[in-house]
Amino acid sequence: MERCPNCRARWDESVICRRCGIELAKLIEVKQAAERLTRLGVAHLTVGDAAAARDDLSRALGLRREPFAEMLLGFTRRLEVEG
């Protein structure tokens, strides 16, 4: 997160926005959970488990849309078609 989703102030990595005072802790937790699921998806891909990777990446994208996770999910779907 680079900016507060409420007021667009630059994020200084605190759990409270310095400008509008919105609580950011839950948003930070969701972002971290999505990142963990994306890393888990990559780990599953490295051991050849495309189905588990697809599940992890789908869950990650359900929490937060990220281009990298979307690209990896597309890759797992292509593996499924080619396999």
Image (cartoon, helix red, strand yellow):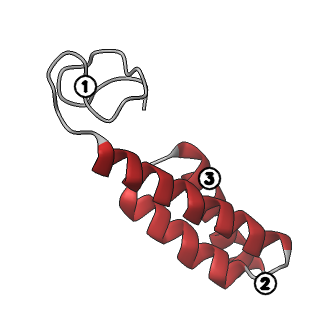
User: Which residue position holds label 3?
Assistant: 71
User: Which residue position holds label 1?
Assistant: 17
- Residue at 76% x, 82% y is 49
Q: Could you tell whether 28 is left or right of 82 in the image?
A: left
Choose the circle earlier in sequence order: 1 or 2.
1
User: Which residue position holds label 2?
Assistant: 83
Tag 1 secondary structure: loop
Q: Alpha-carbon neighbours of circle 3 within 10 Å: few (<14), some, or many (≥20)?
A: few
Residue 2's x, y, as percent?
A: 43, 24
Q: Residue type at mark 3?
A: Met
Q: Residue type at mark 2?
A: Gly
- Say above or below: 5 vs 73: above
Report the number of numbered marks. Answer: 3
Residue 16's x, y, as percent?
A: 26, 31
Q: Nearer the viewer, mark 2 or mark 3?
A: 3
Q: Nearer the viewer, mark 1 or mark 3?
A: 1
Residue 71's x, y, as percent?
A: 62, 53
